[in-house]
Image (spheres, helix red, strand yellow):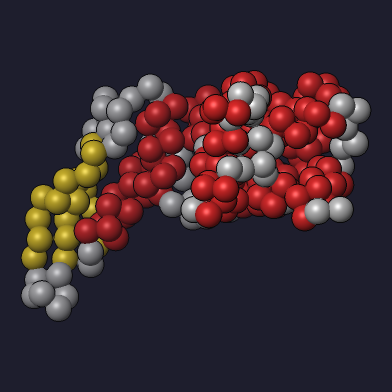
Amino acid sequence: MNARVAAVADLERNLGHAFKDKKRLDLALTHASVGGANRVKDNERYEFLGDRVLGLLVAERLMDLYPDLPEGKLTPRFHGLVDKPACAAAARAMGIGAALRLSPGETKTGGRDKDTVLADACEAVMAAVYLDGGLTAARAVFRKFWDAQIEHQATPGARDPKSALQAWAQGLAKPVPAYEVVKRSGPDHAPKFTVRVTVEGVEPLTANGPSRQAAEKAAAADLLKREGLL
C-alpha cells in the first residue's frame, strides 16, 4: 500500500464514514492542478456543493446552541466557522493533506499544507459525505470536526477582533472596515497611536495602542463591544 492510499484509508477512518462509493472521496481529494491537459475531473464542483452543505450545518448548529441570539450576533459566528481558516483547521484535523491528489508542482510548493487548498478540499469532502450518506452522515462529520471550533469561538477574546469585525460587516453586506491613523504621539521608543475604525452605516470609533496594529485591534474590539457583539 503506497503512502497516499494509506492516507486516504486513514482519512476515511477519521471521518467515521465508510463510503459506499469510494470514487466520491477520491474525487473530493483531487485538486484542480491534476486536471488540465489530462482531462481529469477535479473537486471544484464538490467544493461548490460542500460550501452550501457546510453553511446549512453551521446555521443549524448555531440556531440550536444559541436559541436567544439575534441574527446580528449569529452572523459573525457563522462566518467564522465557514471561512478558509476554519475549514483548513478542520481539514488538518481530518488528515486531508496527506490524502490529497496533487500535481508534482503543487506538491513541491507545499500544497498539502496550504490553507486555501485544504479549505477547498474540506468543503469537497463534506459534499462527498453528503452525497454518499445524506445529511445525517454529513452532520455527524461536521459535529466531530467543528464542535471544538464552536466552543473555542464562544470563549471571550478567542478570536482576533479585526477578523470578527470584518465577518460582522460582511455578514451585513457592508464593505470591509476601514482603519485610519488619526494621531501619533510620544517618542520613537514609546510611541502612541490613535486609530479610527469606520464601518459603513455605523458611528466611527477611535482607540489607542503602542503600535498601529495594537490600536487597530483595540478599535475593532471596542466597536464590537459597543455594538453588543462581544
**Residue 203: image location, x then y, percent:** 24, 33
At 90% from the left and 36% from the top, the residue drawn is 18
- The answer to whether one can see residue 193 in this image is yes
Along the viewing direction, whichever of 221 and 47 lies nearer the viewer = 47
Residue 72 falls left or right of residue 15: left
Residue that sits furthest to the front in the current view: 37
At 80% from the left and 29% from the top, the residue drawn is 23
At 49% from the left and 53% from the top, the residue drawn is 109
- The answer to whether one can see residue 60 in this image is no
Residue 28 falls left or right of residue 178: right
| Vertical side of 63 occupied by 150: above or below | below
**Residue 202: image location, x then y, percent:** 27, 30
Along the viewing direction, whichever of 196 and 68 lies nearer the viewer = 196
Residue 27 falls left or right of residue 80: right
Q: Count how many numbered circles sit on residues in the image.
A: 0
| Vertical side of 49 occupied by 28: above or below | below
At 44% from the left and 42% from the top, the residue drawn is 164
Residue 116 falls left or right of residue 3: left
